[in-house]
Each structure stands twice: as C-alpha cells, then as structure tokens.
Amino acid sequence: MTGTIPSLDAPGIADNVEAMANYADSHSVVRISAKRFSESPWSRHYADDQTVFGVYGGRLYPLSLGAHPVADYWHLRTKVALFDVPEKPIEISGPDTEAFLNSLLTRDVTKVPAGKARYALACDHRGRILMDGVVIKWAKDRFWYVLADGDFLGWMRAQAAHFDVEVRDPDVWVLQIQGPLSLDVLNAACDDQSPEPLAYFAARGALMGGQEVLITRTGWTGELGFEIYAGPDIDHDTLWSHLMQRGAAHDLRCLSLECMGIRRIEAGILDNGTDMDPGLTPYDVGLGAFVDLAKESFLGREALAAGDTGNRLTGIVGPRAPRPGESLLVDAREVARVRAGAWSPTLGSGIGYALFLGPPSDENPLVSAIDGSVFTPHTLPFLDPEKRLARGLPLD
C-alpha cells in the first residue's frame, strides 16, 4: 500500500461525501420497504435510524451506516471489513448445464475447472451487455451465476427453453470479508481452525460455527478477501455472531458500501448499470478480454465479431471527485461523460471513469462543463494493476 493516512478534514476528503451522495442518487436509495424489496437476513445486526439503504438486484443493501467513508476506507485497506452485499446467485443444473451457459455467456465455461470461479458477461443478440457476474462451477452439471444489478432470472429461463436444465433462485445471501487480515479471519472462523489454503478465485465448502456454508476467494474491493454464501437452511443470526466473535481479535468491523465504492474504482472494477449498460458492448468498456470468439456460438457472437473492438471507457484523474453524468469538454466541445467518481485517499486525487461519446482521441486535458475542473485520462486500474493485493502479495 502506498500513501499515508490523512486526517478526515484533509483537502479533498469532503469530495467523497458529495460523490457518495451522487452514487446514492443513481442507486435508488430508500428506507426499508419489505413490500417491494428483499431485506437481508443480517440487517437487524447493524441497521438503525441512521442507515441508508440502496436497491440492487431487488435486494436492499447498506449504502451508508452513518460513519465517515474515509475512516472506513482505511480500516478496509489496513485491517479487515465485513460487508453485507446484495449479490444474487442463480443456480443452473442438469445434463445441458455447460452447453446452456456456453450459449448465454461470452466466455467458455467448459474451461472452468470444478471448484473455481470466473468473471463472465452475458450479451443480447446485438452484442450489448445485459449482465456481468461471477460464474462458479461446483460440478459439471451444477453451476452458479452470481448476478450484478438487474433482472436476469427471467431472461435466463427464457433462453433455457431448448436445454435440459433447471434455472432457479436458491435463495442464497452473501457476505464479503475483505482486507489484508481477511484470511486470518477465515482461518479463525472455520471450525477446524486450519482449513486447506483457499486459492485466488477458488470455491469450496466450509464449516463455520457448526453450519455448512460455501466460500469463494473473490470480492469487489481489489483487496485480499473472500465471500460467504449462506443458503436458506442457515441460521443467519448464529453465523453472523460466529463471524464477529472469531473476527474480533483482528478488529473485524461491519462497514457500509461507501468505502467499498471508493476502493472498487481504484481497482478498476466496473458496476453493471452504472459504468456499463445495455447500450454498450464489452469492447466499449474495455472488457474484450472476456469475449471468447473462438467459441462456436453464443448470444451476440456475430455482432461482436463484426463490430468495433475499440475501448471508449477511460480512467480520469483530477482535483476533485468526478460527478456522475457531468460532461467533459475539449475546446468547449463535449467529448465524454463521467460514469463514476470518488476521491482516492491513497492517491490523494479525484478519480473516476469517463465514457467517450465517440472514438477516443489523444486530446487532453478534459475540462468539466460544470466548473472548469481539469481531468487527465488514466489507464485502469488506478492502483495495483497486477492484482497483487487480491492475491495476497505485497503491493510494492
């Protein structure tokens, strides 16, 4: 890790308050409404009248718990944090599971070993992004596709009509434990106290507090971490208490997604529905590496093979947090719009994503139409391009 921990009133820190307010506006922040959205089985352990919830994939998640996001950010970066996240696994099982997923996703799932997870995209017939998520192979005839934001279950079932598969919602809820001490918490939380090493992007079962859960070495922070998948038969309160008790020695804290939002931008992680949408192809947002045109057929393949493969999404760096939706100009002409922004405490600057309206050029700087702030294009990610932190390796 580079940089020093600034005081909370350091220049630029207040930008994250404004940035998170803009993020909240774009993510439909609400108070709890169980009539319309699914409430986490763990929310009773942290929710109070200061909690602000967002809606993601039909599930509520804690966007803010009232703490300062930068203080939480440094706890994530230096210790370990627990996040109640709204990811939603969909289970696909049956004899045609691999064939079905290969027809739906842009990557070849037959190359995914059992007990491994991989990032995967789904497109429509035009090659435009419908969903992104993590595909987990439990067995040849049983996979999970862990969804990002958006309604995708109905689409999957419609596409499965000619395959011998079952597509169902297994009613699984997810916790992420992230930060440099996360694997210490994993060792402490597993009942045998000495589980076999969990490799990067590996997936397996574990016994925690006498309950069987599934875990993956994945996350949404760019930090070392893992995720816990708890099914409907789990006593969620007991699992939560077990994790907090076993993690206390490592200062495990439940944090909101405010600090995760900062960290995921630093790590170059994209958010479906915010940074990418059904108007864009994987190539438009720099995800062409996850399109396997060597596959014989998948939805959107012909359009992707014939279309433009240029990347229109860039990182930007400036004196403040970029504001989602603001126009960026060159010579008073709009050339790009901001998709996401935050103030990076580690880098000491505003960072974000901007999407060029056409083919990007070498023209810079980019000038904000709001206040004249100057932003400079930057390759993604902003921090740790080799993903050393997530692999458990020192950054420097």
Image: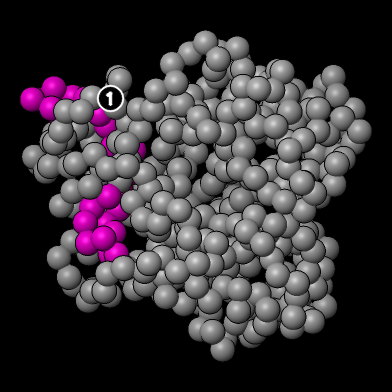
Q: Is residue 390 above or below residue 54?
A: below
Q: Is residue 241 a member of the stretch shown in magenta?
A: no
Residue 363 rendering spot, x and y as whole percentages: 16, 28
Look at the picture and state if 28 lies above or below 297.
Answer: below
Task: Give above or below for 317 relative to 355.
Answer: below
Q: Position of residue 146 (x, y in %)?
A: 66, 46
Instruction: Name which residue type carries label 1.
Output: Pro
Residue 119 or 386: which is nearer the viewer? 386
Classify residue 354 by image quadrant.
top left
* Stretch in magenta: 329-351
Counting labels gives 1
* Residue at image coords 60%, 12%: 302
Question: Which is nearer the eye, 63 or 293?
Answer: 293
* Residue at screen point 50% across, 73% down: 180
Task: Decide whether residue 340 is among the magenta residues.
Answer: yes
Q: Quadrant of the N terminus?
A: bottom left
Q: Considering depth in this image, is 33 or 392 the residue closer to the camera? A: 392
